[in-house]
Image (tube, rainbow, N blue to C red):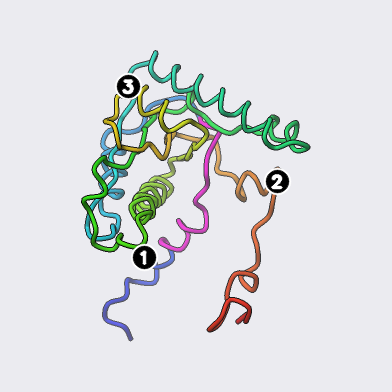
Amino acid sequence: MNQHAYTDAEISGVYRAIRERRDVRHFKRGPLEPGQLERFLTAAHHGPSVGYMQPWRFVRITDAALRAHIHAHVNEERIKTAEALGRRAEEFMRLKVEGILECAEVLVVGLIDKRDQYVFGRRTMPEMDLASAACALQNFWLAARAEGIGAGWVSMFDPRQLRDIVGMPEGSQPIAVLCVGQVHEFYTAPMLELEKWDQRRPLSEILFENSWDNKA
């Protein structure tokens, strides 16, 4: 027996949260319970980071006009994305891609400025700051799902424009508009899978042994 392992019930809860986590677009109006947002942010802040640089920053949007401004900008990018999709444009426009106006909380998540000062783990792969922040966001997502709260990562925006909208410093980079709130129900599968946009690949397609052309 592994003395470091959690109990069977705890292990089951971890895997359930991973399996049932969803990128949520449909929210039920109403606030979060006191303390929930802080717990989710604390979970995010416990995420792993290359060189312990902790590159993530969260801007909580509490001003209604600012939220509407962000929504308008995201919608502009949504239309541009549809135009870039060509034959799938009409299909794309039928999808709900954000819940900015309906959710309880909106957070703009960004990477810090002066990131070039952090070399540890990033000398040949500077994008590891983004990978670290993505780990933090996954922690947030899983904590929220465990408490029955939905979260949705919106990435349809121009980073430079969104940076200006929320007053981030030059050199920083927004990577997400995070929508958080209560839901009527969680999707039984990822929304884009339910909408027939794409489907999850089998494990056999993504696992290799020793070389890229040798499937495990």
Q: Report the side of 216 relative to 15 (left or right).
A: right
Residue 132: percent from left, percent from top: 34, 54
Image quadrant holding the C terminus, namely bottom right
Q: Residue at left 39%, top 72%? A: 8
* Residue 26 magenta-highlighted: yes
Q: Measuring from the top left, give residue 163's x and y in whole percent.
A: 36, 29
Q: Which mark is residue 62?
A: 3
Mark 1 or 3, closer to the camera: 3
Real-space Cα separation, disc 2 to disc 1, in angstroms: 34 Å
Q: Please name the residue shown 37% across and 60% down the image.
A: 125
Front residue (pair 52, 184)? 52
Q: Which residues are magenta?
A: 13-27
User: Residue sitting at 35 percent across and 38 percent down?
Assistant: 173
Question: Mark 1 vs mark 3: which is more N-terminal?
Answer: 1
- Quadrant where the N terminus is found in the figure: bottom left
**Amino acid marked by disc 1:** Glu
In whole angstroms, how far apart are the C-alphas of marks 3 and 2?
33 Å
Check the image and name the residue furthest to the top.
65
Foreground of the two, 67 or 10? 67
Query: Residue placed farthest to the bottom in the image?
Result: 1
Residue placed most toward the observer, 19 or 61: 61
Using the image, determine if residue 24 lies above or below residue 76.
Answer: below
Mark 1 → mark 3, Cα distance in angstroms: 35 Å
